[in-house]
Amino acid sequence: MRSLTVRQLAFGWLHFALALPSIYLLLGMPLVLREQGWSGTQIGLLQLAGLPAVLKLLMAFPVERCRPAGGGYRAWAGLLGVLLCLALLGLAYDLPLTQPLRFVAWVLLISLLATWADVPVNALAIRCLPAGERLRAGSIRSAALFLAAVVGGGLLLVLHQRAGGTAPFVLMALLLAVGGIILCALETPAQGEGGPTSSTSTHDLPQGSTSIGGFFLQPSAAIWVVLLMLLFPFVGAGWVYLKPLLLDLGMPAEQVAWWVGVGGGTAGALASLAGQRLTQGLGIGRALPLYAGLGALALACLGLVSHMAAGQTLWLAGAGLLACAMGALSGLVFGLMMHFARPGYRALDYGLQASLFTLSRLAMPILAGVLLDGLGYAGMFMVLALGMVAVGALTLPTAGRLESALSRVLPPKPAA
């Protein structure tokens, strides 16, 4: 596979296939489990199966240092993908929907394997794609995750209702098998996997830099870590509480699923792809404040609509605006994460950044829930909007410095 576009689509498929099981189990299956008599507490505890995402840094150590069967990132991705396929087929055969502890154990195993496989797949993407393609790769990955949310949060539930509970798991295993074939056919650079490649280096490695400490010695790494942990959580928390809000307003559950789940996911995917082109035209120094401002505007609109108790049309318009902000921000964040992965430490640096990103993303909805209980929906959205305004203000003096640090490997902006 020599075409860069084919490589980009191949990694997009791998991201989609790996994200789909966790999204279906954690976001789609609660509806089915509620029908099976699960309590709210049991369904809530099921969400703890998503915690392995916080441990990506620990998972990255063996990926970086061990080479199963003499291979590198590709061997790790293949091994973990096979185990994930077997786990999905095992759950399809067992499917203990009336035994919560047993079902949660299966979900935790699948979540662990999918999260772990994500590390070598992203490290391999960083290694295979030239620096000028990384922003595009970030947007494609973001679009793939939104597509997985559309399929896992909606379409697989329809398949469950029409073809039985085992069908979605068999289908997901088949999608992963296709990903395995793509992985085997994917051409990689001639050097050994995981080895240094100066031509694709984002920064010159500081002398004596080792392991995790060397990550923070990169130019503008401290700025990037702060932005990494702040750019997405406010809009992400707003999205978490959007569906419950619309249900509380009396919108039928199926209508919420179609408008917010499918429609919002599609809007987010398209915004991810469009955001990459806009970023290339504007440059990171302008794109970061713009996307942060879009997130603040979306949250403020939802807060204002909550205060006004407006009709469904304005609610859906605010939801669409929020989905676009999420898509543009996540695409840019994923692309910049690839730029800050050093040659020789790709899996480790990706794992570190992914763990930090996940920690902040999981913590903010908890704070938002406290705000919701104390201030109501309008107050919660307005506080989240103010937080996003503060993040946007932070990007004004820092985004330019970040762009300057990456200027050696970023593609030039097209001429006006």
Image (tube, helix red, strand yellow):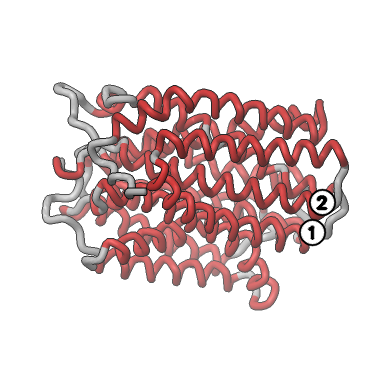
- Is residue 220 placed above or below 348 in the rendered structure? above
User: Which SS class for mark 2?
Assistant: helix
Residue 291 spot, x, y in % from top left: 53, 40
- Disc 1 marks which amino acid? Ala
Between residue 65 and residue 411, name the one nearer to us: 411
Q: Which SS class for mark 1?
A: helix
How many C-alpha atoms fall within 10 Å of the one at disc 1: few (<14), some, or many (≥20)?
Answer: few
Apparent side of residue 379 relative to residue 235 in the rendered image (left or right): right
Whether residue 59 is visible, yes or no, is no
Q: Residue at x 48, y 26 (%)?
A: 396
Residue at image position (44%, 69%) is 175
Between the C-alphas of marks 2 and 1, the distance is 6 Å
Give the crowd class for mark 2: few <14, some 14-19, many >=20 residues within 10 Å: some
The amino acid on which the numbered mark 2 sits, given as a three-letter code, is Leu
Q: Quadrant of residue 368?
A: top right
Q: Is residue 146 left or right of residue 196?
A: right
Q: Which residue is mark 1?
A: 253
Location of residue 302 (image quadrant): top right
Instruction: Indicate whether 77 appears above or below 151.
Output: above
Where is residue 333 shown, x and y percent of the image? 44, 40
Which disc is residue 247 wearing? Answer: 2
The residue depicted at 51 percent of the width and 47 percent of the height is 328
State if disc 1 and disc 2 touch (CB < 8 Å).
yes
Instruction: Say whether residue 412 is visible.
Output: yes
* Image quadrant containing the N terminus: bottom left
Q: Earlier in the sequence, mark 2 or mark 1?
A: 2
> Farthest front residue?
416
Asked whether 372 or 4 is in front, the reply is 4
State the image coordinates of residue 189 (x, y, percent, origin top left).
16, 55
